[in-house]
Image: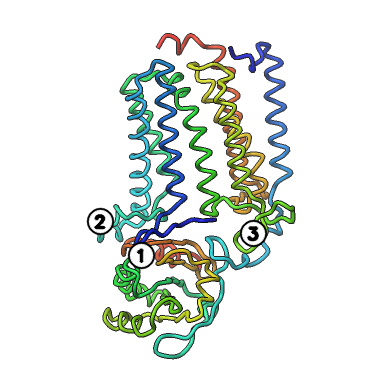
Amino acid sequence: MFPFLRLGPFLLQLPGLALLGGVWAGSSLAEKEAARLRLNAADLYNLIFYGLVAGIAGARLAYAARYLSAYLANPISLLALTPATLYPTAGLVVGLAVATLRGWRKGLPLRPTLDALAPGLAAFMVALGVAHFLSGDAFGAPTTLPWAIHLWDDDRHPSQIYETLAALAVFALVWKRPLGIGRGFNFLLVVATSAAARVFLEAFRGDSVVWAGGFRATQVVALLVLAACLWLLRRWQARPEVEASQ
Amino acid sequence: MTTIIPQDKRRWNSLVAAVLGLGVLWTLLSRVPAAATTGGAPPPSPRQGFSAPDFTLDLLGGEQVTLTNLRGKVVMVNLWASWCPPCRAEMPAIESVYRAYKERGLEVLAVNTTYQDSEADAAAFVQQHSLTFPVPLDRTGGVSARYQLRGLPSTYFVDRQGVIRAVVIGGPMTEATIQSKVEELLNGAP
């Protein structure tokens, strides 16, 4: 793991750089896909940008709301470059809500827009795996397997490498656009295969959130996401005219 | 187009049932055993969710401190050096939070990385800023190695059971950042 790189007085956080690279690659791919789908590339780019900015702001504001007195006394802290003071779940919800609202206001058709985002999302998932590898986050369970890596004082499954390889496989699959483009299937394919991979790979993680009965929370959520995607695949296939008319 | 999705509804439903059934089965098989979550304190490692690696160090001005002797308190372990600008910048905020929360059970250990600093410079800095918390001296670099130090400052927020609950690498941390992390732990289980 090489989480930091010191360049003179600067301490570069490499996982953050990997995520930035993922955002750049993802948005570039989305723009290209938008052109292929004859969508307004600038509108799509703005949708991503607004979603990201709102997501980060929402994550910080939600965190600050939990410690209101501290942030009211020192409001400039809202601008602190400290990832540890973000509330990721709230950021995700706010980011998605703002992006959805932006897309709706700009009249972007839902299913072609989702398909335009699909390759970029898959590319970002690869970057996320790399970021986890660099930071040591999303680490694996202890193991005696020969390909174990020594991390956090134990020999562990290289779960970040599993995650990255799975994301690369999803990217390769979606790149071929096996279900065509413009009907939302490519996006559903990315989400469904990523969820399936998560169900499988979570079993090798050493940092799972565990619910009652020993169930790993991420596996349960991923199963629900997978089920929803499979349901939507069938439903959207049966109703192609809905989007075609938009 | 859409050749992956079978046109026959029954075939599609069978495929979905098989995929989800396998998923449910795998989820059941890979449940975390109860013993893994009730097996006592987590192993030591400088990472959120693990026990804070223990150390005993001399303090600036004499005496010694041992981290495990502070169980029952919320401990903020901050690794720093006097030549490090962000370390210097965040010290007043740390001091302010320390004074505000000391009575509620906060302890601050500002571990000076003396092996790459000067004890005299550290002492001068402490005096100049009237810092009142203990300053352990890592003369050999052993604690920095144990905490896998890769950047200064590095701060570990340790709960009353000795488990690291948050890690902040780099700085300077603002007072609100420190306060939020400390409050979260002080308001947690006693």
Q: Nearer the viewer, residue B189 or A81?
A: A81
Labels 1 and 2 positioned on one and the same chain: no
Crowd tier of the residue under label 3, counting other residues whose Cα lies within 10 Å: few below 14, some 14–19, many 20 or above: few
Residue A166: mark:
none
- Judged by depth in the image, the label closer to the viewer, 1 or 2, is 2
The answer for how far apart the CA atoms under marks 1 and 2 are is 14 Å
Callout 1 touching callout 2 (CB < 8 Å): no
Look at the picture and state if A102 lies above or below B152.
above
User: What residue does disc 3 label?
Assistant: A150
Q: Quadrant of residue B136?
A: bottom left
Report the side of A105 relative to B183 (left or right). left
Image position, residue B56 (x, y; %): 53, 82
Q: Inspect this view and state whether residue B34 appears.
A: yes
Q: Residue at x 37, y 41 (%)?
A: A55
Question: Mark number for residue A76?
Answer: 2
Left or right: residue B31 versus residue A78 is right
